[in-house]
Every structure is written in C-alpha cells, then in structure tokens.
Image (spheres, rainbow, N blue to C red):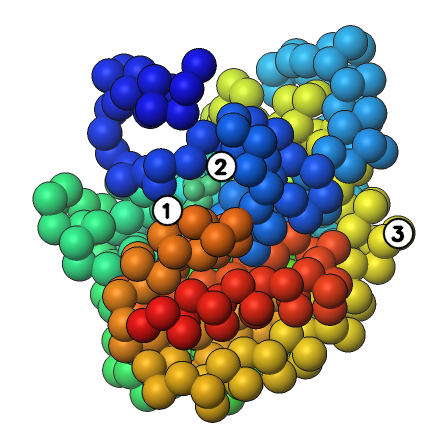
C-alpha cells in the first residue's frame, strides 16, 4: 500500500482524536525507526518515553515470545510466576513494599487515588477527603486522572469531575501549604513534570512537600510514569532527592512496549487502605505483561542504563546549551537525564514536523517546548546526530 492510502484508510476508520504526523511506521532497529517507504528515522521520542531499550532487542523479545507460548492470561484469581517475579522487581526498583499492576499509566493514577482516599477513610472513619495536585501537571486521560491534571483544556469539557481537588503551583511550597486542611488526604505530583513542559522538582520543594505530608499524615503520591525507569539517571527520579514517597505510579518504560503500569505503596499504606473487594482489574498484571516487566527491570539493571544516562546526560545538556547560545529563539533548556526540553519562541509543531522530514523523531511539551526522550541506550554518537538535525532545522527559521 502507498503511504497516502494507509493514511486515508486510517482516517476513514480511526476516531480522529489525534492529529497524527503523516508518517506510517513499519519497524524499528535499535535507535532507528523505518517507515513503510523504507525511510530511516533516528528516534528521540521512544514512543513517548516507552522504548527504553530501543527497538528489536533480542533478549527482550525472546522473553515475550516464550511467555506467549506458555500462557497469556489467567486473571488475578490465581497466582502465576511472571506476576510474582515482576512484583518483586518493581518493589525493589521503587523501594516500595507492595505492588498493584494496571494496564496503563492513567489506571495506576486511579489506583493511587483510591488507595489514598481509603487510607484517610480508614483513619478518620468518614469519606469526603481532598487532594492537592499541581498546575501544569499531567496524570492521564481517565476521569479521575483528568481531575488531578492541572491543564484547563484537558478538563473543561468534562465537568463535573472528581470533587475535592485543589491546585497548587509546582515548585512553590507556600502555595501547597496554603491549601492543606484537615481534609487533605493526598498530594500528587510528578517528580519531573513531562507534558507540562519538562520541569524537574526543586530539592527544596520535594523535600518540603515530604515534610508537610509527614506532619499532617498526608499520602505523597509521586507520579513517575514518564520520568521513572532510568530516564532521570536513577531508576526512579525521586531517588535523585532525599525522599521516599508513600505511593509511586509507574508505566511507560515499565513494559518497554507492552501496555502495563503499576502503583506501588509502602507497608504502612498497604496495611491501612485497600482490602480484597476494593479494587481490581481483569487484565492488569497478566502473565504476558509481567514477563515484560520482570525482563525490563532486570535488563535495566544488568545494562546499567540509569548509570549510562547519568554519565552521558551532561554531554546532552552541553549540546543543548550550544543550541541556546547559537539561536535567539532557543531561550533555555531544562530537564534531567534523558528527559530534556528546549524552550522555543518559534512554533514547536513546525520544528517537530521539519525534524521528521529530516529523519529525526522528537516530541513537544506544553506550548513552547521541544521535548526529547531518547531510548536510554542512546550514546554520544546519536546525540550528535540528533543535534545536527535540530541545528539544520533551526537554521531554516
Ligand atoms: C503518560 C503519563 C500518564 C498517563 O499514562 P497513560 O499510559 O497514557 O495512561 C500519567 N502521568 C504521566 C506523568 C505521564 O507522562
């Protein structure tokens, strides 16, 4: 089929909820993607932070294939080896004690919210608690997740949303303090805001929020769906700070290509919140996705990818700094590890489009940030290649 035929057929049948770029991807190899015309693209998007090992990793794919032939699904009424192995891996990687697997990031957020609400309900003997979330945050597209997402246009058409959510200013501790009341059951935040424009939390903010939660017995939910799994240079981004959350949400690179998420909680939360009957999922944590999780966590550690990211990220940042010096419209860069953003005053969508034309996949975030989330296997060579393409696109503006 010709590219335009694919696109026409897609638009005929797919609900038009995305403005897709006119690219039809066919396969991938390492750091590169190939479209149906055979054109090669360097990938600095990872399918939005998912493909940590790049494409076609043999060890990873073989583990999945083996599981496909063994057993795909059992339901959560029974035990199976992959979920046992995956739960141990996620508990160790997050530093939490108990794990619940979901099918997506948004569902991990839903579970985290329910857990925090139940914790406060068990403690107080009544419901009606409130949650503090952050402006410019992103937590997913389900109704509960949208309710804690601090972006107006994601929320406005869908009122009434979940009640009792208040929004503070990210990295402004006083704004959080001002919203705390005896009704507050949870504070939810990304360690590094992703969709909102790549804003890492400051040390003062994250440690201040932790202290505030300790003082008032508030559950701290860290959303690590985008910044977790090695991307920040540590396995989980909060491990760059001196904090331990009460609940961690993880997804995206957790399955490195298969749809799986999880929320993980401390023993204290686990023993005073959800009990059998309170929560569940048919697919969540099935043998296929759990074989992927167990493999992705163990490969991440064996390949020392967080360490690799921490080692190469300063070089990446140096190159971004050069671009901000060279072009007036490149105002600043910010980020952590392999989660980097360039703040632009030229239309970011046009830049993304021109990069694609020149064979580079990049993303946008917020309204003015060029977002880069390369696979964690990226090295200096690929960073040079990506920066050269961005440089050549910039030179056309
Ligand atoms: C992507 C994302 C989500 C939602 O994950 P889905 O798998 O798309 O539901 C939630 N939080 C953050 C920080 C994300 O980046």
Q: The C terminus appears in which quarter of the rendering?
A: bottom left
The answer to whether residue 216 of the structure is visible from this angle is no
Identify the residue shown where x is 65% and y is 69%: 384
Mark 1 to mark 3 CA distance (whole Å): 31 Å
Q: Nearer the viewer, residue 275 or 369?
A: 369
Indicate if the residue with disc 1 has its beta carbon within 8 Å of ligand 1.
Answer: yes
Query: Are dots 2 and 1 in contact, CB under 8 Å?
Result: yes
Secondary structure type for disc 2:
loop
Residue 195 position in % (x across, y down): 38, 59
When asked about the image quadrant of residue 376, the answer is: bottom right
Total marks in image? 3
Identify the residue shown where x is 82% and y is 32%: 58
Comparing labels 2 and 3, the label whose residue is closer to the camera: 3
- Give the mark, 1 or 3, whose residue is nearer the N terminus: 1
Q: The N terminus appears in which quarter of the rendering?
A: top left
Q: Nearer the viewer, residue 163 or 286?
A: 286
- Residue under numbered circle 2: 104
- Give the mark, 2 or 3, whose residue is nearer the N terminus: 2
Q: Is residue 387 above or below residue 85?
A: below
- Residue under numbered circle 3: 302
- Give the mark, 2 or 1, whose residue is nearer the N terminus: 2
Indicate if the residue with disc 2 has its beta carbon within 8 Å of ligand 1.
Answer: yes
The answer to whether residue 231 of the structure is visible from this angle is yes
Residue 184 position in % (x across, y down): 33, 65
Indicate if the residue with disc 3 has its beta carbon within 8 Å of ligand 1.
Answer: no
- Residue under numbered circle 1: 140
Q: Nearer the viewer, residue 82 or 317?
A: 317
Q: Is residue 63 above or below residue 388?
A: above
């Amino acid at each position: 089929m010709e590219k335009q035929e694919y696109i026409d057929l897609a638009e005929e049948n797919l609900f038009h909820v995305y403005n897709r770029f006119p690219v039809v991807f066919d396969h991938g190899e390492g750091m590169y993607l190939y479209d149906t015309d055979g054109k090669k693209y360097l990938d600095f998007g990872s399918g939005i932070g998912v493909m940590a090992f790049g494409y076609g990793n043999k060890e990873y794919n073989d583990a999945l294939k083996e599981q496909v032939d063994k057993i795909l699904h059992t339901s959560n009424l029974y035990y199976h080896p992959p979920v046992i192995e995956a739960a141990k891996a996620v508990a160790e990687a997050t530093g939490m004690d108990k794990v619940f697997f979901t099918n997506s990031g948004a569902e991990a957020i839903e579970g985290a919210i329910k857990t925090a609400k139940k914790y406060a309900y068990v403690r107080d003997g009544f419901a009606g608690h409130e949650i503090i979330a952050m402006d410019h945050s992103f937590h997913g597209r389900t109704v509960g997740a949208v309710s804690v997402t601090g972006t107006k246009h994601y929320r406005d058409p869908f009122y009434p949303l979940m009640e009792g959510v208040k929004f503070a200013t990210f990295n402004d501790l006083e704004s959080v303090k001002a919203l705390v009341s005896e009704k507050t059951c949870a504070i939810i935040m990304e360690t590094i805001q992703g969709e909102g424009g790549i804003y890492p939390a400051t040390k003062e903010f994250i440690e201040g929020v932790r202290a505030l939660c300790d003082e008032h017995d508030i559950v701290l939910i860290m959303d690590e769906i985008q910044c977790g799994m090695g991307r920040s240079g540590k396995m989980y981004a909060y491990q760059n700070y001196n904090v331990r959350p009460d609940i961690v949400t993880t997804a995206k690179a957790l399955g490195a290509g298969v749809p799986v998420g999880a929320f993980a909680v401390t023993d204290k939360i686990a023993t005073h919140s959800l009990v059998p009957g309170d929560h569940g999922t048919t697919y969540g944590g099935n043998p296929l996705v759990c074989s992927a999780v167990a493999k992705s966590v163990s490969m991440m550690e064996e390949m020392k990818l967080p360490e690799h990211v921490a080692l190469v990220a300063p070089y990446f940042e140096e190159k971004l700094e050069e671009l901000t010096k060279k072009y007036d419209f490149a105002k600043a860069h910010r980020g952590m590890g392999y989660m980097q953003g360039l703040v632009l005053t030229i239309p970011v969508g046009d830049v993304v489009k021109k990069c694609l034309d020149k064979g580079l996949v990049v993303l946008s975030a917020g309204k003015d940030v060029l977002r880069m989330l390369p696979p964690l296997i990226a090295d200096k060579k690929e960073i040079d290649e990506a920066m050269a393409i961005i440089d050549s696109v910039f030179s056309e503006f």
